[in-house]
Structure formats: structure tokens, C-alpha cells
Amino acid sequence: MTTYDKILVKINKLNFTNEEKDFINEAYKFALTAHDGQKRPNGDDVIEHVLQVTDIVCDLNVDAITLASSLLHETIELCDVSNEILEKKFGHEVKVIVDNLYKLSKVNLNDNNDSSSIYLRKILVGLSEDFRVLLIKLSDRLDNMRTAYALPEAQRKQKAKETMDVLIPIAHRLGINNIKSELEDLCLKYLKPDIYQEILDKLDGTREELASSLEDMKKNICDILIDHNIKFEIKARVKSVFSIYAKLTTGRKWSDLYDILAMRLIVPTESDCYLAAGLIHAKYRPIPKRFKDFIAMPKANMYQSLHTSVFGSDGNIFEIQLRTPEMDLIAENGVASHWSYKEQGKNAQNIMEQKLELFRTIIENNIEEKSDEIFAKNIEEEFLSKQIYVFTPKGDVMELPVGSTPIDFAYRIHSNIGDKTVGAIVNNAIVPLNYELNDGDIIKINTKEGSKPNKDWLGFIKTTQAKNKIKSYFSKKDRENYIARGKELLEKEIRKQRLSINEVLKEENINKVLKDLKLCTYDDLLLSIGSLRYTATYILNLMHEDKKTVGDILLNRLYKSADNNKNNYKNNIIVSGMDNILVSIAGCCNPVPGDEIIGYVTKGQGVSVHQKDCSNIKNICSRLIDVMWNTELTDNKKFNTKLLIKTNSNKNNILEILTKASLKNVSINGIKEYENNYLIDYELQIKVKDKHELNTFIAELNKISYITEVVR
């Protein structure tokens, strides 16, 4: 039986229509033709890899779109099939999924730097607008790791590290344990081959004894269940190599590992789970504190099961899991197991999206965070750390990182709940708001209309979501306060000059100042006064010094103070020894520290700083003023600049360029694509520390084969 025949057997057991089966078969025929004659590093046909991936995906109970996308997932990369052809033959959804998989294939963790791993996680989840992309990616990686023995050792280890750092945590979050467990073993095999082999050898040395112990325990439990007329399916195994390795890394010795034997009982109903557990406990002594009820208290990824550990008659410890068939399906395949090909499809996708929501929230909340260390800390605390499972009074489960407080819980429910929190009751007892929640806590949040967040909360809350909501609240409040203060300062100055408020603040006067200062609204003007960007006197001068232009006023102010030798400079750029002058970096040439610069006194926008050889000022003699970088302030800052990247490629190469930027600590603010005679050029808006960092990044870009020129 061929691999595709095996897939067809599985498809026929699922609830596909004839039309959907034909759709999948067309995708198979297309892939078969496209990959004809192509080989993989281990000598297998590429189409065999494609089918193996689809076989893994099929076990996740996915829809026809996902199966077709899996069959086509290598066609863009290996066969030069265009997006247009895919969309025309198989529709928009398939095109988007396959295109995103192609983009992911272009991003690799190409060093052992932690920041590279973090950046790859950002891209991976950022691209996964459709969770089905992740299902296929995980399945693709599993088959690749199964055949990684054919790769050079360095490449094999790199793939294993990438898998361990990026894909396994995502599989864990989605609850896809069958893929997660096998990937863990394979990664350990390639990253630590000596330890992997040592564990295997020790298992082989005791395999006969372990197998005998398992068989005896299995028979005894079967007898118990048969005697009580409970239908069941039983599975017995020695725990995975990686799970044994994880126990050893906690400091335990091999001789102390008694709980490496595991059994799983699958019974028809929930009540059968509890009944079977009680019958087993009646004959075999349970280990204290090892009984976990995940049926009554499911994990946030919908995992349900009873866990217990008992002493067998031979002294070995057996970990036993009891669950229903539906629970077993969820435990193995995660929430993907809820996929239905009819009306439930959208609901399943929504459930799956919720599982990714936490990770995406972290990424969105840190989109402006330029420090990989801080991003790493947030990832560790909220995505990779140990989680607790707590409850609302109605019994809904909430997953939070260890160390979370009632404030974190409140903001996880809704930002309005968090903002109005005044107290918390945990397990029917009043607790302080900085109380650390525990597994199984039932939390009731007390709110009060008109209440608002407290800045002190930032000192003890755990989740990035709560921190960002509170910071956002106070940022909005600060804006309101600055506007009120600006209004007060402006009206006070008008009265001081014995002018009429109504006359001064006429619409034409306000519009004149807004135009001169390039502001949008009157509130923006008041904000600039309240935050001390401009003084009220300066604004009134702009309105009423009719014979002088804004530039004249500023020039006069500059030249009057040119002899004032102040040293307490507050700007990144020093202007003729002056303090508190509005200075902006020219967008035409975007100078960075290390460039030679000159200042130009604009009409209404202070001093604009250009590179000395900027084409926009090289023929100007007036209004120029000497400026210099203030090295005391620029050392720890980054500055905007632009690069034009010319290529000889017509493919989308954005991800490789982004990866290069991340490795060189260059921040990307934006990318634009330009078509140039069927080739694609890119304009990058970036932030760098200085000219040296910029030149290093340009040199790195010039090493890429398809880049022909990098122009600043």
C-alpha cells in the first residue's frame, strides 16, 4: 500500500463530501506532476516527503483546504509554481496558506544567538494568520526531523535547535502532544547524541524487566475492569527518552527513577474514569499528591484526563492516565481535534485562534520593544513558563503564568474589568491585590464604577497584557492633563499681555499656527504647550508678529543667543550653543551620528538638520547654522534613516533581509516594495545607533547574492 493509499483510507473514514475528496485528489495529481523527478537529501522522492507530511496532518482531523495545502506546500519553493496559478486552480485560501509556508521556509535560525530564536518566533506567529499554517509547518518539521540523519551534522543540529526553541513550545501551547513528544526525542537525539544513546542503552538493559512489569500490571488492571463490566482500551509504555532526560536534569539519579512506566486507560464516560480510578486505588496504593483531576479542571488548551501514580505489586511506580475517547483525541491532537467539516469549522478555527492569542498579544504589545532581552523575558514568563489554571465564579478556566495576581486575572477577562478593579475574593476569602494566585483558585473580582488603575500595580503584576493596558491608560490620562495644562498656560499668557481671549483664539489665528507648526488639531497645539515643547509666549508671537515670519522670529532668537555659552544641552544635536531649541532631523537625507551635519532654520519648524552634502541645501547660503552631535545623549539612542536595496530577483526576499537586520541589531520600521522591470527593489526605513552600525549592516546586505546595490 502506497503512502497516498494510506491517506485515502483515513480520508474515507472522515466526513468529507465527494466534492472535497475530488478537490484533495486534484491537489495530489498537481503535486505529483510538479515534483516529478525531484529528490531529497536522503534519496527519497520529494513527493514521498509531501505525502508523509500530509499523512501526519490527516491525523489532526483537518479540513479539505488544509489537506490540499499540505499536498501543495512545496510547490512554490521547489517547483516555481506562482501564487496566481495556485489561486486559479485551488482558490484563495490554499494560495495564502502555501504562500505563508513558503515565507516561513525562508526564515532560518542561522546562529546560536538567543535573539535569532526570538526573532524567528516573532516571524513564525506573525505570519500565521491562519492557524492551519502552523499545523502543516509542525507536520513538515516532524517528517524533516525523522530524516535529518541525511543532513550534515552542523545543519542537523541547527534544525534541532530551531525546533526545540521555536516549534516545540508552539506545539505544546496548541496541545498537539503526539507531534511534540516525537520532536522532543528527535531533537535530543541530534543535539545530545551521547546522552540520548546512554538513556537508550540503560532502557535496553532493563527492558526485559520493565516489559514484564508492564505486562503484569496491564493484566491485573484488565482483570479489575472486566470484573466490573467497564469497557476499556489500555495502552502501556515506557516513558519517552526525552521525558526521562528531563527528570535526570532535575538532579535525580537513574536509580531514583521509579516512575518511568506509564499506562493509559480509555473508557466510555467521565463517570467510568472516576470509577476505574477508585477501583485501581482500592488495590494499589496511590502516591500522595500525585492525583490530578484535569477532567473537573481542564487545562486552557482543553486537555482533560485523570492522572494518578500507584505502587505496583513489584515495587515499581506506574503513572496512570484515565480519559474518554474524546479526551484522548484532544490530548493527542490538541484543539485541532475539534475540526468539523460542516457547520463547526469556523468554531474550531476560533477555538484554535484563542490558543494563539496569548502569544500574539505578547508580540503585539512588544512590537515597539527594541530590546531582545526584554522580549525574551516576556516570552519566558508568559509563553514558556509554567502555567497555573484558575477559575471564574462560573467555572470558566483561565490560564496564567505562575506568579500572577488578581489584577492579571482581571485584565485577562477584559480591560474594563481591570481598570475598575477595587478588590478580589479568592476561594471565598478577601485577598490583597498583590496576592499570588495558585492552581485551582476561584477568583471573584470586585469592581466599582468610576474607579481607575493604580500605577503601583505595575510593581507587582506579572502579565505583559496587564502592564500594557495600565501604561496605555496613564498615557491617555497624561495627554488629557497636558492639554488642560496647555489651555491654562495659553489663557494665562493672553491675560498677562492684556489681550482678549476670544480675539486671540479666533479660528484664523489658530489655523495659522497649526499650519506653521504642522499640527492637526487645537488639542495638539495645547498638548505641545502643556508638555513644554513650545511656550505660550512663542505661540502668541507666531499669531501676532505680523511683520516677522516665523523663521525670522526663530533666527533672531538664535542669533541673539549665539554667544551664550551654555553646557547643559538637552537635545541630541547642539545648535550654536543653545538649549531648548526645536530641532528635527531632515527626512530627505536622514543623518545619523558620525555624519557631518549642518542646520537650516526653517519657517515654523525650528532647525532642520541635514547631512552637509545633502542635495537639498548644497546651493543654499542663508539660514544655515552650525550644529554638532551631542555625544552625551546619542550614545544609547537609535536614529531613523533609509536604504534603497536593488536586486536582480523577482521573488519576495523580505524575510531574509529582516533576519539580517535582526542579527546586526538594526531595527526595521517599515519596508516598501518597488517593481523595477519585473525585478523587486526594497526601501527600508530603519533605526541604527550610528554610521558605523549602518555601514556594517550595508556590508552584510551586499554579501547576499541577489542584492546588486544598496543606496543610502
Image (cartoon, rainbow, N blue to C red):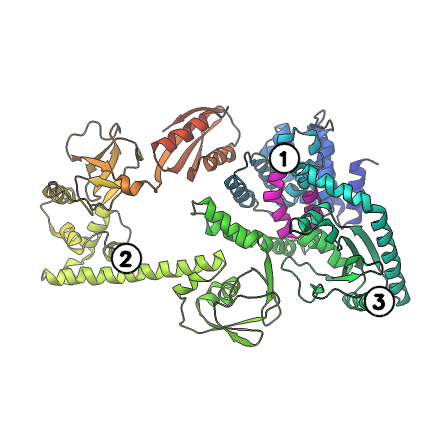
Alpha carbon separation for disc pair 2 and 1: 57 Å
Front of the two marks 3 and 2 = 3
124 relative to 533 in the view: left or right: right
Q: Which amino acid does label 3 sit on?
A: Lys
Label 2's element?
Answer: helix
Q: Which residue is drawn at 45% across and 28% down?
A: 700
Q: Does 298 appear in magenta?
A: no
Decide: marks 3, 2 in contact (CB < 8 A)?
no
Q: What residue type is labelled 2?
A: Asp
As drawn, the label of residue 283 is 3
Residue 185 is situated, as x and y percent measured from the top left of the image, at 70, 43
Helix, strand or loop for disc 3: helix
Of the numbered discs in the image, which one, if any, rests on residue 523? 2
Answer few, some or many: residues within 10 Å of disc 1's Cα (few below 14, many 20 plus, some between 14 and 19).
some
In the picture, the quarter occupied by the C terminus is: top left
Q: Which of marks 3 and 1 is in front?
A: 3
Disc 2 crowd, CA 10 A, few/some/many (<14, 14-19, 20+): some
Q: Quadrant of residue 346?
A: bottom right
Q: What stretch is highlighted in magenta?
A: 156-185
Q: Where is residue 301 in the image (x, y as percent from the top left)?
A: 64, 57
Q: Does 491 sit above or below residue 145?
A: below
Instruction: Find disc 1 in the rendering and name its residue.
Output: 157
Q: What residue type is labelled 1?
A: Lys
